[in-house]
Image (cartoon, rainbow, N blue to C red):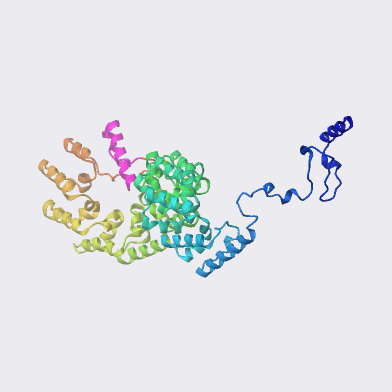
Amino acid sequence: MVTRRKLLNLLSALNVSDLLPHHANAIIRFSKPPKTLRVYYGTQSSKLPEYEMPSVTWGVIQGRKEKLVSRVIIFDYLKGLGIIPDELHDLELPSTVDVMRERVEFLQKLGLTVDDINNYPLILGCSVRKNMIPVLGYLEKIGIARPKLGEFVKNYPQVLHASVIVELAPVVKFLRGLDVEKDDIGYVLQKYPELLGFKLEGTMSTSVAYLVSIGVNPRDIGPMVTQYPYLLGMRVGTVIKPMIDYLVDLGLPKKVLARMLEKRAYILGYDLEETVKPNVECLISFGVRRECLASVIAQYPQILGLPLKAKLSTQQYFFSLKLKVDPEGFARVVENMPQVVSLNQHVIMKPLEFLLGRTVTEEDVARMVIKCPQLVALRVELMKNSYYFFKSEMGRPLKELVEFPEYFTYSLESRIKPRYQRLKSKGIRCSLNWMLNCSDQRFEERLQGHYIETESVGPGFCMGGKLELPGNDIMSDDEAEIDDEILYRRTVSL
């Protein structure tokens, strides 16, 4: 008994495998051994089903051959539809062809064609119930109409892989935080669906922060995004900042530039090297003075993105042929009214034909256009009314119109008639420039004064920030500041 007890204690302290011979199916048996010491070694344990570990996806090991067969069947089905499955080899596909058929039919009902699926075949890896239905339901909820969901998925099929809670909802919340109206969310995403794939702390946040830093009103970011959502995908260092720096170097103050961007955010989408810089050089080559470039851009920002060389060439030839305006005069026209590069030639000719029909010579018409290019965009009906009042009521010589063509740009009912009546009642005779080219407040001051100011040019655009109106020396500082600020806003609104 003592010997047996020692043996049992020794076996319990040692590793049994160290004592076993290394050959299969070796079994140690003791005479009447306790049940706890019966040990099996070899392949017997592998035959017992309770020791087999299940895989993460049930049936992968046992059904590997069946899975390969199912994949071949699914590929044959897709090829029969014209879908190329080459990119699906590494994608986990459904176990049966019926599930794949369900996905294809769902996408086709949505409006996708075989070509659309071939453009992004990975869309077939999305489950109808787990991916497609939840995402499409959310897109419809935020304002994308059901008939347009198919077009949305065509433009951005990756959206079906996204999680509504983790990826889509935070982007929508970010847009609302920028003051994008709730009713405009769907419109913004339809214009730029890739926004749903951006990270909030990345490009979107930095582009907004930079625009605010140059003077853009934070409350205007929402309307800017609604008008041109692509700005949220622009990198500050490589796209936005180089454009801003270049325009500032041309003489545009950041304050003016910020107001421009608030109204026309799409300017940021013009390619700096391919479009903007060549257009600026084109303006210079056509005679626009470098110091006037900032004024030209401020009045007509779209000029930076036009096919400018062709337009300038056409209009310069037209002005020379029809209006007898030489290239230097045409350059002055562009400086004062850059929109002329986009005006239809039939529109330009109508007011000029009216003047020529009133015995104004071609040379005088050319002088009038160079001095006041806005003439070429006026409505003939309004010009007729102003002209007949000038001839019948005011009884002034035609020479005064040639010297002050801006007369046609003022409202007959709200400015010309009332001021003429006031001057007539007081027996004052003055030039058209003195009568019209001032604010209502200044006009009243002139009528009350016992003097007539010397003739001076009208307001000029100063790129330093404000408009300087001649005669400010007779106004108080507070009045001058208010008047200048109003004129400044009007100029920026151009």
Q: Residue furthest top?
A: 2
Picture coordinates of residue 129, whole percent (x, y): 46, 53
Predominant secondary structure, magenta span: helix
Q: Is residue 453 among what the camera can see?
A: yes
Picture coordinates of residue 234, whole percent (x, y): 48, 48
Up/down of 486 relative to 371, above or below: above
Picture coordinates of residue 97, whole percent (x, y): 53, 63
Residue at point 18% right, 38% down?
A: 444
Picture coordinates of residue 383, whole percent (x, y): 20, 56
Q: Is residue 483 magenta?
A: yes
Q: Is residue 442 left or right of residue 78?
A: left
Q: Which residues are magenta?
A: 466-494
Residue at point 86% right, 46% down?
A: 21
Of residues 332 and 105, which is closer to you in this image?
105
Question: Where, quadrant-wise, is the N terminus in this rendering?
Answer: top right
Q: Is residue 297 left or right of residue 46?
A: left
